[in-house]
Each structure stands twice: as C-alpha cells, then as structure tokens.
Image: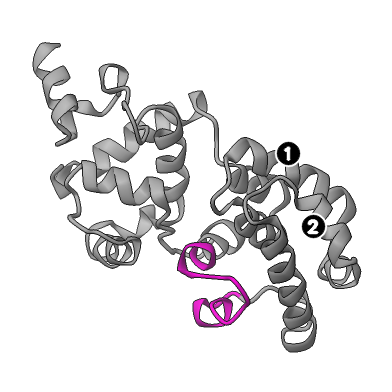
Amino acid sequence: MRKEDLDKVIGILREEFPKWNAPVVSLIAQKTGDPFRVLVCALISTRTKDETTAMVCKRLFERIKSVEDLYLIDKDELSELLYPVGFYKNKALFLKEIAKELKEKYNSKVPDKLEELLKLKGVGRKVANLVLAEGYGIPAICVDTHVHRITNRWCLVKTKKPEETERQLTKILPKKYWIEFNKLLVAFGQTICKPVKPLCHICPIREYCEYPEAKMQTRAS
C-alpha cells in the first residue's frame, strides 16, 4: 500500500465500520467517556476474545463504578468477576495494584500522559495508547495484534514487533487518523482481514492491499 492511498483506505474503512462489530473498548469509551473504564476494559481485553471481554466488563461495571470501588473490593471477589478472561487471577492482582496507585499517587484519576500510564502495574504501550486515544481523545496509535498484522499485510510497514510498528506508523500515518486507527483496524481485522483465511474476496480495500490473495482477487474482479 502506498502512503498516498491512506486517505482513500481510511475513508472506505470509516464507511464500512458500522457494518462490523466495534471493539468493546471503543464502545465503552463512546458510551461512558470514562478513562477509568477504558483502562480497566483495555487491561481485561488483552489475550481475550472481544465477546468475552464485553460480557465480563458488563458484569464488572455493575459492581465497580470508581477507583474507590476497585480499591475496596476483595481480590477473590474481583477474580470471580473477571473469570473467564485470560489470566484473570493475574489481572485481578494488576487491577488491585493499579487502584492503589491511582488512589495514592494520582488522586484517584487516570493519568493522561503516556509516561505516567506506563508506570502503572501491568500497563504497556498498547494499553496506555488506547487509554490516551479512546479515554482522553489524545492522538496516540494503539498497536495491537490486528494493527500489527494488517499494516504488515498492506506492506505499509515491514516490522516484526508491535513496538516497531508503532514507531513506523507515527512517521507514516497522518496524526488526524491516530485516534481512530486502532478502532477501524480491529473491527476490520475481526470481520474481514482475519489472522487465518482473510476474506479477501469481499474486502472493500483489496485493490490497495499487497497481500497475495488480495492481489489475485483484484485481478480476477
């Protein structure tokens, strides 16, 4: 994919997005506008299917509505609420530690700076950037497995690690697209550009893609 095609491609993804399943973190951000819930949901979602994340977040946020609630809840009860997300016991520990840090160091407010978010237990660049973009509306590129896979399939980047992808995208992708890029590509990746057997025959942007199957489908159409 050429950098010059990005405006067209993102325009098409925006048009198609309502037909796809939106990422649960984006839905929570849109519904609540609460960086705390975005942070909690983003942590829960790692290595967990979106439908499981959605179910658990719905149950959890009926019980946990603030940093104080998370700080006070018993660890075992929190673990039960998080089941069956991946590594739910570890995530319960991380969330309890985060609640303690937010309460004691940040006046129970989720930081809006990358370097501060990265100090929180269990928070890496993916989660931190997602909180900035979805929770605060601050331009940041969240590179998860979908963004990493798809941008390499497009040959927009040639990277082996998500951190490398993020660095390259900050140089290639116009800043006006940073906030929505993850949301668009996650929905696209869950619905069309799947990890195994991507649906190139119905892909709305296959003419711009360098993936071999997409190029074959473009020539055949």
Question: For this view, does 195 lie left or right of residue 52?
Answer: left
For the record, the magenta segment spans 112-129
The quadrant of the picture occupied by the N terminus is top left
Q: Is residue 124 magenta?
A: yes
At mark 2, the secondary structure is: helix
Q: Residue at x 47, y 62 (%)?
A: 126
Which label sits on residue 79? 2
Q: Is residue 83 magenta?
A: no
Residue 169 percent across, percent down from the top left: 27, 60
Residue 99 percent across, percent down from the top left: 77, 74
At mark 1, the secondary structure is: helix
Question: For this view, does 108 lie left or right of residue 63?
Answer: left
Q: Which residue is mark 1?
A: 55
The reply to whether discs 1 and 2 touch (Cβ–Cβ < 8 Å) is: no
Q: Nearer the viewer, residue 48 or 137?
A: 48
Gap in Å between the C-alphas at discs 1 and 2? 14 Å
Q: Nearer the viewer, residue 139 or 218?
A: 218
Number of the front mark, 1 or 2: 2
Q: Residue at x 59, y 64 (%)?
A: 136
Residue 175 percent across, percent down from the top left: 34, 60
